[in-house]
Amino acid sequence: MIKIMLDSASDQGPALRETYKLVNIPMSITVGKKEFIDDNDNNFKVETLHQYMREGKQPHTAQISPQVAMETFEAAAKAGDDVIFISISIRLSSSIQVAKNAMEEVKDRYPNFKGAVVDCRSASGAGTLLFLHGQALVEAGYNFDQVEAQLQKSAQEIAVFVAVDDIDWLIKGGRVSKTVGRVGSLLRVKPLISIDDTGFIRDSIVRGRDRVYTKMVDRLIDHIASPYEGQYIVVSHVGRPDMAERVKNYIIDQFGPVNIGIFAASPVIASHIGLGGMAVFGYEKKPELFEPVAFKS
């Protein structure tokens, strides 16, 4: 059996984990002097993170544990399963190198085990999008090599746009200077950023909260080819499910009836873009190997 796994930098949620019996390799989160294991709502709740952020506390995230990665991959190998692990971008975390090292060691111990690591080129909904794509291919009967090759390629074809509600979070995360941040706050402008292999890139500056969210969707649509049947788009939010629904409806108004999943943003993205932040993720073109995603969030 092919097992597709994620680290906790990808957006998940109870429904996704339950539907696919998802195996998650957690990162850790530090707030002040407290350290938490980001096990996706089992012990550390996303609402807890949001509360710390409302109190003005800056979360910091750390890579996955080498030991946990090794144990997770080895358990799959012992069960006779093969693994495709989708990781946060190497530009954002060293987790992917930890995963690759663990994967190679398990492959050495278990010659019949197939394992691969896919860099999602960003985080959050990008990993979710790849995961759901991979699951659809596995369920349709594609083999390990076909699924891995397609996900490696598709990871390079994801459009990502992020709207930031409070520029102070970009200052805290070192993404913009304090001077630029002060000017932005005084002018009440909202940054719109994209993410690629080089990390966070400022796309544009927009005045007004509603405008930055609609601009975010417009930029995504600019980067996506003609709509195709079964297309799936991910909307991620930091503590704003109401606004996420509005963004979803705006996408449908502009783009037609596509399948849209709404997820609470992973702590990795949330800690950088802050409360009220929003992100959208979609393939720039239809993948060569493609099956419609059945999952409804």
Image (cartoon, rainbow, N blue to C red):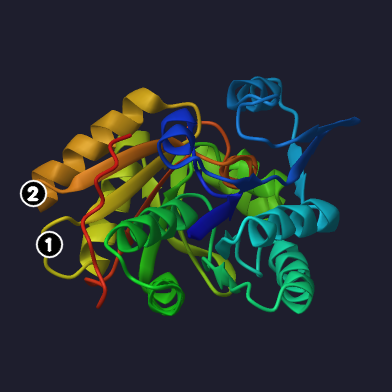
Total of numbered circles in the picture?
2
> How busy is the neighbourhood of tag 1: few (under 14 within 10 Å), some, or many (20 plus)?
some
Q: Position of residue 233 (x, y in %)?
A: 28, 51
As rendered, which of 186 and 230 lies closer to the eye? Answer: 230
Say whether marks 1 and 2 touch (CB < 8 Å): yes
Tell me the SS state at disc 2.
Answer: loop
| N-terminal label among 1 and 2 | 1
Which amino acid type corresponds to the residue marked 1 in the rendered image? Pro
Residue receiving disc 1? 227
Q: Judge whether 208 appears above or below 148 on screen.
A: above
Q: Residue at x 61, y 34 (%)?
A: 40
Tell me the SS state at disc 1.
Answer: loop
Q: Residue at x 25, y 53 (%)?
A: 232
Residue receiving disc 2? 256
> How busy is the neighbourhood of tag 2: few (under 14 within 10 Å), some, or many (20 plus)?
few
Q: Position of residue 185 (x, y in %)?
A: 55, 39
The reply, left or right, for residue 212 in relation to residue 128 is: left
The reply, left or right, for residue 165 in relation to residue 212 is: right
The image quadrant where one finds the C terminus is top left
Q: Residue at x 33, y 70 (%)?
A: 142
Q: Residue at x 24, y 38 (%)?
A: 248
Residue 189 visible in the snapshot: yes
Residue 110 quadrant: bottom right
The reply, left or right, for residue 108 in relation to residue 137 is: right
The reply, left or right, for residue 86 in relation to residue 132 is: right
Q: Position of residue 215 (x, y in %)?
A: 28, 51
Q: Position of residue 244 (x, y in %)?
A: 33, 33
